[in-house]
Amino acid sequence: MQIAFNHSTRQVRHILPQIPYDPRIIIEAGTPYIKRTGMAGVSLIRRMWRGLIVADIKATDGAAKEVMFSAADGANAATLMGSTQ
């Protein structure tokens, strides 16, 4: 199961502690949440959740650096975008 946080750190602080740890649960730092909080939002989730975290950054340009930032702040995975013609 993947649970996405898209709003605020207040929402994360209120809801995340109520989710029982299960290694099958993935917590997502959603794109709107990351835009509001930056990578500090991912760090907050990491401090509160010991399981899998995905940073939904949808990186295109500079993806390698953005993925490195996500990993440094505790994300286990990040989303990327691509296009082709």
Image (cartoon, rainbow, N blue to C red):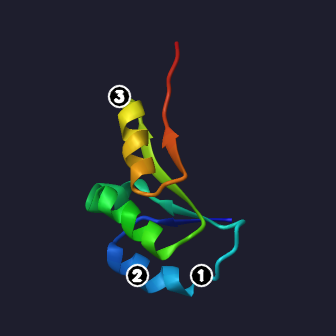
Quarter of the image with the N terminus in it:
bottom right
Name the residue tied to disc 3. Answer: 61
Image coordinates for residue 12, horizontal then vertical, percent:
42, 76
Question: Label 1 belongs to which residue?
Answer: 19
Quick one: SS at disc 1? loop
Amino acid at pointer 3: Asp
Amino acid, disc 2: Arg
Extreme residue in the top direction: 85
Tell me the tag on residue 57. none
Residue 51, x across and y down, in percent? 60, 67
Question: Dot 1: few (<14), some (14–19), or many (≥20) neighbours within 10 Å?
Answer: few
Left or right: 64, with 18 as reference point: left
Using the image, tell me which numbered label, if any, was put on residue 13: 2
Give the Cα separation between the discs numbered 2 and 1.
11 Å
Q: Nearer the viewer, residue 22 or 30?
A: 22
How far is mark 1 from mark 3, CA to CA? 34 Å
Q: Position of residue 38 (x, y in %)?
A: 29, 56
Mark 3 or mark 2: which comes first in sequence? 2
Q: Amino acid at mark 1?
A: Ile
Q: Is residue 56 above or below residue 67?
A: below
Disc 3 element = loop
Q: Residue at x 42, y 64 (%)?
A: 6
Q: Residue at x 47, y 50 (%)?
A: 56
Measure how far apart labels 3 and 2 are at the Cα level: 31 Å
